[in-house]
Amino acid sequence: MATLFDRRNRRWFLVGGLMLLAGGCSSLRGQRVVSESIATSRQLSREGMAAMELGDLPRAQELLDNAVTTSPTDIDARRQLAEVLWQNGSTPEAVVHMEAAVQLDPRHAPTIVRAGEMLLASGATNRALQRAEQAIALDPTLAGAWALRGRVYRRQGRAEQALADLQQALRFAPHSTEALWEAAEAQYDLGRPQRSLTTLHHLLDVYPAGEVPQRVLWLEGTVYTAMGRHQDAAQSLCAASQRGEPRPELLYALAQAERAAGDPAAAAQTVRRALAVDQAHQPSQVLLAQLEGSLAPERGGVIRR
């Protein structure tokens, strides 16, 4: 016959078992809810990225915003939303979400670099420097981290340090177009046009034929001008002027190169193109007056209109 003690123990065992079972069900329900929220967030993220690839940025932003709301700790959704906001021109919001991604995964160096790039573009130079150094400490072989710090140093006027970091970036990513471009600019700013030209030629080799950006050809022409190679400068600047709509500053530089290369008539024609883009561009106005004076008919010149 069961004693009173046995009956009490049996009753407490049954109560305890029911409590454990209830707790276990509650835990399972919680896990299921969490799993469902993550799955929903990831589905929304996939749909958002598909919309972004199709160029529908408003729809992409809506989907990714819902993904983050559904699962605030979804790092990928945070990063993707930040990128869409960045493309939409919502810079402060983009920075907030990319910084949130850093807080969620503080050891993912590429995310830290991207946050630093956004901070730098937003004018937060000191915070960008902190992110660059944080990324370098986590992964000293990450080219983007060195390139970011190099860009920060350039912004701060620390040209030698900037160039050293950009060259370090090129050690790990020798074909990085951005690092090559930044290094060439830094070398030019330091008064080393020959080294800048060498770097630019490496950069030109990276691009497929006919796909060299305007800014690269423009810098090449500027470097040739600094070296006194005016004919080469004119050729590079002319090629740059044919890559999209040329700014008046580019056309003015081309006109100067053409005049220095001994072709004032071509220079006059080019500077008129500059003034057609911006009638108020004062350097072009001055140069055109000088050219028209040198090409006056009584001096035997011919003015091309």
Image (cartoon, rainbow, N blue to C red):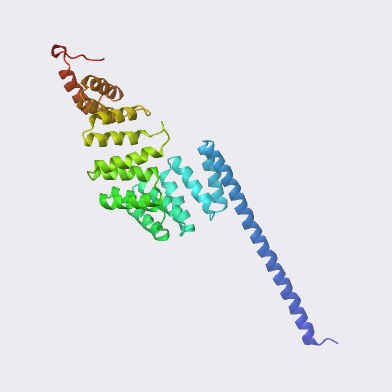
> Does 177 appear above or below 3?
above
Q: Position of residue 286 (x, y in %)?
A: 18, 25
> Does 256 appear above or below 43?
above
Q: Quadrant of residue 134?
A: bottom left
201 to the left or right of 16: left
Residue 282 appears in view: no
Q: How many labels does the image show?
A: 0
The foreground one among 46 and 58 is 46
Q: Residue at x 23, y 28 (%)?
A: 257
Q: Which quadrant holds the N terminus?
A: bottom right
> Does 200 appear above or below 70?
above
> Does 237 appear above or below 117?
above
40 to the left or right of 285: right
The foreground one among 103 and 225 is 225
Q: Where is residue 254 in the image (x, y as percent from the top left)?
A: 26, 28
Which residue reaches farthest right? 1
Q: Which quadrant holds the C terminus?
A: top left
Residue 159 appears in view: yes
